[in-house]
Image (cartoon, helix red, strand yellow):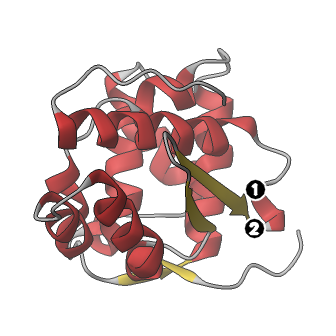
Amino acid sequence: MPEVSGTSLARVNRILIDEAVRLGADRDALLHDSGLDEGMLADPDRRLSARWTTDLWMAIVRALPDGDAGVRMGASQALRDYGLVGYAMLHSRTLEDAFGRLCRYSGIVQELMQLEIASGPDSLDLSFARRPMLEALEQPAEYGASRMVAVARELTGVEIVPVEV
């Protein structure tokens, strides 16, 4: 496996595990297959090597091979579950400001995806680039896309529908 650099908060891994379990995965098997343990996840603000998150995604893909697991996982968490960055987004004046904060501070939560925002006269375009170790997996990208739609809906109270994914 190629060298994995960067970190993510333990809360990210815990959220991913909880969501995968909600969809039918076995928690103990996910922990075992990813090399994580409950002690590593106890402090939500603990920094973990991105290798753990990458290994967890691979365990999730094996446990939930149906193609829509990433989409369903990303659509269900509350923004406040993401700690300081989530709260900063919740207290933003506009949706564009909220996503701007996410782009600026996403490295606090995770360093596996780089987020960018571009606004047009009638649109807000979000894009993210995955680290090479996640390129082969569709679920993390689908998770990210559905997470962004869910965040937009949570912040606006409107059933926003993406024009393009």
Q: Position of residue 89 (x, y in %)?
A: 22, 63
Q: Residues within 10 Å of mark 2 (few under 14, many from 20)?
A: some
Left or right of 149 in this view: 129: right
Q: Position of residue 36 (x, y in %)?
A: 47, 64
Q: Residue at x 72, y 62 (%)?
A: 129
Left or right of 38 in this view: 56: right
Q: Residue at x 39, y 82 (%)?
A: 108
Circles 1, 2 touching at the beta carbon (< 8 Å): yes
Q: Mark 2 falls on what kind of element?
A: loop
Q: Mark 1 falls on what kind of element?
A: helix
Q: Is residue 9 visible?
A: no
**Which numbered disc covers residue 134?**
1
Residue ID for mark 2: 131
Q: Quadrant of residue 61?
A: top right
Identify whether 150 is placed above or below 13. above
Q: Position of residue 68 (x, y in %)?
A: 59, 18
